[in-house]
Amino acid sequence: QVQLVESGGGLVQAGGSLRLSCAASGSIFSTNIMGWYRQAPGKQRELVASITSGGSTNVADSVKGRFTISRDNAKNTVYLQMNSLKPEDTGDYYCNLGQQRFGRRRDYWGQGTPVTVSS
């Protein structure tokens, strides 16, 4: 099993910054992908950014140039630096870890951390 613990969410004014952290523990394979998803009220969960254990990143167009994802493999921790925040960035942010097990991808989720951006 894998456990994910997120931290860093909160309330910030538009234009401000927040940094989210997610620490993974448990049965973590050396090859995996970690990412951040968000879900706004009444909307579907969407990918914000992801990063492989090799360092390749995928960032949603809506946050490109404002959000940066990074990871520390030694600590099994992924970060999301969020700058120039907008009210539309408001939502619950979920950490995700995906890894292959017996030929199938298995996904693990954190409990979510709220981000509220006031205008």
Image (cartoon, grey):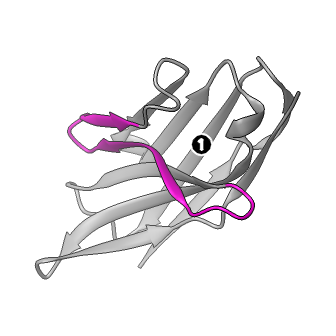
Which class describes the residues within 10 Å of circle 1: few (<14), some (14-19), or many (20+)? many
Q: Residue at x 59, y 42 (%)?
A: 21
Q: Nearer the viewer, residue 51 or 88?
A: 88
Q: Is residue 84 left or right of residue 28?
A: right
Rendered residue at 47%/42% (across/down): 78
103 to 66, vertically: above or below: below
Q: Amino acid at mark 1?
A: Ser
Q: Is residue 27 above or below residue 54?
A: below
| Horizontal relation, residue 83 to residue 50: left or right | right
Q: Which residue is mark 1?
A: 21
Q: Residue furthest left?
A: 103
Quadrant including the N terminus: bottom left
Q: Which residues are magenta?
A: 40-59
Q: Position of residue 19 (x, y in %)?
A: 65, 32
Residue 53 drawn in magenta: yes
Q: Residue at x 27, y 44 (%)?
A: 52
45 left or right of 43 in image = left
